[in-house]
Image: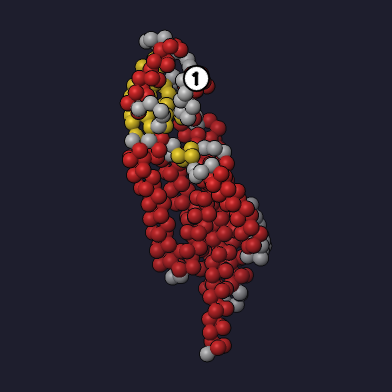
Amino acid sequence: MQLFHKSNINFIGHRWIFFTISAIVILAGVASLITKGGPRLGVDFTGGSLLQVKFNQTVTTGEIRKTLDEKGFNNAEIQSFLDSNVFIIRIKKAAIPMTEVANKVEETFKAKWGEGSFTIERTEMVGPRVGETLSEQALWAVILSWIGIIIYVAFRFKSPAHGVAGVIALAHDVIITIGFFSLLNKEITLTIIAALLTLIGYSINDTIVVYDRIRENMRLLRSKTLKEIINTSLNDTLGRTVITSLTVIMVLLALYIWGGEVIHDFSLALLIGAVVGTYSSVGIASPLVYEWETRKAKKLAAMRKNA
């Protein structure tokens, strides 16, 4: 199956258009983050209480949220399990001590639905120190994954340009995804960090496929310029890239629409990341390699001329 039969798109010639589009989207996300004082962190990072409640009757997420809002728990995160009356309720640090949050919620639900109408199956507390530790560990997980990718890709392709350009493209994907979450006022939780790490693996895999084709064509098309070789490689892999991405995006769309609230944000992060990752593999990673190699060649030529 071929979506693009002998396409001849000048990706490198349009690289500054790609760079400009990315810069605009990144700036919009960064502006949102600055305006809101950083990403909206979930209970996992800020500290708070988690309750798992099972109701004996049908109750909606909206009813629970309205009931909690009336008692001052305005930042509660509520997730429902599909086809059941079980809910996970995450409440950030409140004015009252965390040890009293569960009791307060229980009293609130008794007043609304009556005693014996629900069961609190489990309660957990995340202290601020634990949340701070989790934040540091999540950040290190992302940074170490990037360092590992730079080393691996640089070693495999015998050029630091490929490793650095690949990681810049990954940082581009992660920043844009976090920016979209800020624009949509979504929380960053440990589940979203897992989605971002998954996105990093998916995106670098797509980028390496393109790099492999560039390396092949460097041997086969010796008479061509670097610009022509990279353009040819991107056009050669374009059909594979689009078909692979479309299959992933269709699955993620299904999860986002019908997967339930528990994995709603997780699938959204992957959906945004899959689209942005596909774009960066074509419009960011390879053009950055071209910029690196072209500038290095010009610098070497100038040095030889001066010598």
Is 218 situated left or right of 13 in this image?
left
Q: Tell me if residue 81 can be seen.
A: no
Query: Residue, x 43% and y 48% (percent of image)?
Result: 197
Q: Residues within 10 Å of mark 1 (few under 14, many from 20)?
A: few
Q: Residue 202: where, in percent of width, then height?
A: 47, 50
- Viewer-closest of 290 and 72: 72
Q: Indicate the secondary structure of the residue bearing disc 1.
A: helix
Q: What residue type is disc 1 on?
A: Glu
Q: Residue furthest bottom?
A: 307
Q: Tell me the quarter of the picture where residue 298 sits.
A: bottom right
Q: Tell me if residue 204 can be seen.
A: yes
Query: Residue, x 63% and y 65% (percent of image)?
Result: 12
Q: Residue 167: where, in percent of width, then height?
A: 47, 59
- Viewer-closest of 227 and 168: 168
Query: Residue, x 42% and y 15% (percent of image)?
Result: 109
- The image shows a total of numbered marks equal to 1
Query: Residue, x 46% and y 25% (percent of image)?
Result: 73
Q: Which residue is mark 1?
A: 70
Q: Residue 143: where, in percent of width, then height?
A: 41, 55
The answer to whether 293 is drawn above or below residue 58 in the figure is below
